[in-house]
């Protein structure tokens, strides 16, 4: 796997996905082992500070790709480079926000936000200032000593975002983060995320199954096709920034981009994980992928 | 549960549970006095109390209680020290191995220590160790099984989230898996402690020269009904206190768990 001469060292490129493939070996009792190609030929270059959304059918590789980016899963082939260096495992240069919040229920909001800092071995005296800052950034001042069970879904997701931002990763990976909250909270969180993105200049990879959400948030939308999971097309979203939920959704450009992505997703319908034809296959693709 | 909350809110209802205790004591007090067989077999609470006070004054009460507590405590602590790490290894470690040994563990967990008592005596003699070994045996299994359950029940998204932040095995264990499984471990400890004390009395009845169980047994064969009842009441009260103590500890240490479950509903 060559790291030189393939463009991975360009200055403004933050993340380079090169020929990512993921193959799962499914064990079947009757006909021996079978292979399932979850991801194939994934190539993507993300500029520093860019917001890229991944959309596509559920459970067909998006979350697997995010796991690979997070370093939680090694790809069967290909490699991921961040700042020109191949990633080999999880590290604090990438923050992750999951759909199910994944907050530690035994920790207060503050202690949740400080978790990454503890791993990073930031001294206690400094941790407090940092957590204060990020709790304020996500608008949760006054809730520092609350436990997750005392918060609403939207507030929990804010904590998760603050936690991922607190240890100052340059890349934020978000796996359907707003899928579990109601529509109104979702729009508020989207607005907030864009504001935070603008303030922190992070590079964001955002997995979603909502075309609306992808178009509203992202600079580019990568459209997945399934079986094997690969990019069908990457669509530029040329909508002006700053964007606000109140006005942009009704614009003609928004409708046009939205429709185009919708068409791309429709063009080869109901291919969702037919291979293998059972739950096992779906589980193998990504245990975290739901709905 | 909402209904009982409402009821306990009303002053009259709130005292109803105390009333049942009073009523129970009154019947217990009066029934033996009606005469007949009851009088010979059942000591009324006033007499029980009198006997307990005498016990206390003579120092017998403290002596027997201390001996019993030492045995139960030693067996329980040693069981916890071994079963919790073992539960972590089996529940979190190598799954195929766990699947292989699980049936055997399940079977051993069901083996009644009284059938093993002769073995304990052969191995450990008739002294303290065989009784402590018995307590060890009964409290070991609930703690082991609940620790394994707790390990397996640790939310994988929490683990995934912590791993994504670069948490190493050590951090993952102490900051995620251990706290996540602590409610299950605690309920195992609670169950183990209850069983330990319960079984101890029985163990002391079959082979001891001191302790609360011996007191019951000794009163039995000497047909000293007030003493028998006094010892029984004392044992029940101590058992209640142990439960109460663990209840308080549980709320203090793993209160977040119960509350987050309530939040889901």
Image (cartoon, rainbow, N blue to C red):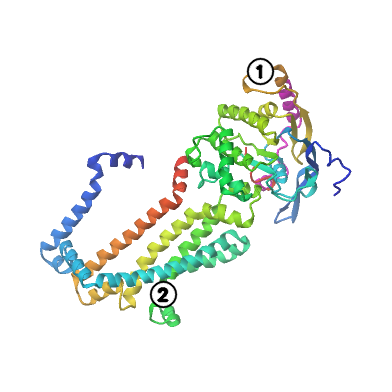
- Taking the image as drawn, is residue B175 in sight? yes
Q: Between marks 2 and 1, how big is the CA–CA gap?
A: 78 Å
Horizontal placement of B129 versus A198: left or right? Answer: left
Horizontal placement of B62 versus A30: left or right? Answer: left
Q: Which residue is mark 1?
A: A250
Query: Which mark identifies residue B115?
Result: 2
Q: Residue at x 70, y 23 (%)?
A: A241
Question: Magenta stretch?
Answer: A256-283
Query: Considering only vertical position in the picture, is B1 above or below A267?
Result: below
Q: Nearer the viewer, residue B91 or A103?
A: A103
- Picture coordinates of residue B6, whole percent (x, y): 31, 38
Q: Nearer the viewer, residue A162 or A66?
A: A162
- Picture coordinates of residue A15, whole percent (x, y): 77, 40
Q: Secondary structure at mark 2?
A: helix
Q: Nearer the viewer, residue A70 or B105?
A: A70
Q: Residue at x 67, y 37 (%)?
A: A58
């Amino acid at each position: 796997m060559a790291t030189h001469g393939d463009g991975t060292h360009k200055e403004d490129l933050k993340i380079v996905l090169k020929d990512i493939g993921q193959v799962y070996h499914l064990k079947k009792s009757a006909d021996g082992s079978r292979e399932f190609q979850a991801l194939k030929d994934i190539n993507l270059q993300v500029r520093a500070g860019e917001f890229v959304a991944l959309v596509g059918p559920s459970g067909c590789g998006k979350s697997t790709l995010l796991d690979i980016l997070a370093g939680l899963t090694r790809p069967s082939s290909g490699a991921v480079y961040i700042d020109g260096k191949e990633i080999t495992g999880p590290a604090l240069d990438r923050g992750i926000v999951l759909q199910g919040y994944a907050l530690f229920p035994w920790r207060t909001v503050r202690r949740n936000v400080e978790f990454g800092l503890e791993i990073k071995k930031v001294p206690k005296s400094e941790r407090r200032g940092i957590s204060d800052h990020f709790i304020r950034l996500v608008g949760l001042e006054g809730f520092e000593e609350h436990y997750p069970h005392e918060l609403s879904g939207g507030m929990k997701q804010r904590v998760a975002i603050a936690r991922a931002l607190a240890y100052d990763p340059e890349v934020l990976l978000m796996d359907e983060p707003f899928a579990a909250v109601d529509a109104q909270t979702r729009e508020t969180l989207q607005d907030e995320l864009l504001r935070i993105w603008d303030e922190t200049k992070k590079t964001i990879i955002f997995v979603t199954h909502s075309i609306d959400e992808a178009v509203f948030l992202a600079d580019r939308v990568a459209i997945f096709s399934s079986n094997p999971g690969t990019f069908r097309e990457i669509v530029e979203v040329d909508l002006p920034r700053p964007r606000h939920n109140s006005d942009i959704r009704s614009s003609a450009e928004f409708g046009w981009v939205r429709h185009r992505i919708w068409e791309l997703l429709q063009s080869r319908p109901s291919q969702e994980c037919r291979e293998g034809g059972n739950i096992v296959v779906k589980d193998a693709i990504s245990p975290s992928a739901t709905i | 549960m909402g209904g009982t909350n409402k009821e306990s809110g009303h002053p009259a209802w709130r005292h109803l549970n105390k009333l049942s205790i009073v009523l129970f004591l009154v019947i217990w007090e009066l029934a033996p006095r009606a005469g007949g067989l009851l009088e010979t077999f059942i000591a009324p609470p006033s007499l029980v109390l009198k006997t307990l006070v005498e016990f206390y004054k003579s120092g017998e009460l403290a002596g027997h209680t201390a001996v019993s507590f030492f045995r139960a405590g030693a067996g329980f602590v040693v069981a916890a020290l071994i079963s919790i790490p073992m539960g972590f290894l089996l529940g979190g470690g190598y799954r195929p191995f766990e699947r292989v040994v699980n049936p055997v563990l399940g079977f051993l967990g069901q083996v009644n220590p009284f059938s093993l008592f002769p073995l304990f005596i052969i191995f450990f003699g008739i002294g303290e160790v065989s009784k402590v070994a018995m307590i060890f045996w009964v409290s070991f299994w609930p703690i082991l099984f609940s620790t394994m359950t707790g390990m397996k029940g640790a939310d994988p998204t929490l683990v995934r989230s912590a791993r994504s932040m670069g948490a190493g095995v050590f951090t993952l264990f102490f900051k995620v898996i251990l706290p996540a499984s602590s409610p299950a471990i605690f309920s195992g400890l609670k169950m183990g402690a209850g069983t330990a004390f319960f079984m101890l009395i029985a163990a002391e009845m079959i082979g001891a020269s001191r302790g609360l169980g011996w007191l019951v047994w000794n009163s039995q064969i000497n047909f000293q009904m007030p003493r028998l009842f006094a010892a029984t009441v004392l044992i029940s009260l101590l058992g209640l206190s142990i439960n109460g103590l663990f209840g308080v500890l549980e709320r203090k240490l793993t209160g977040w768990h119960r509350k987050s479950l309530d939040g889901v509903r």
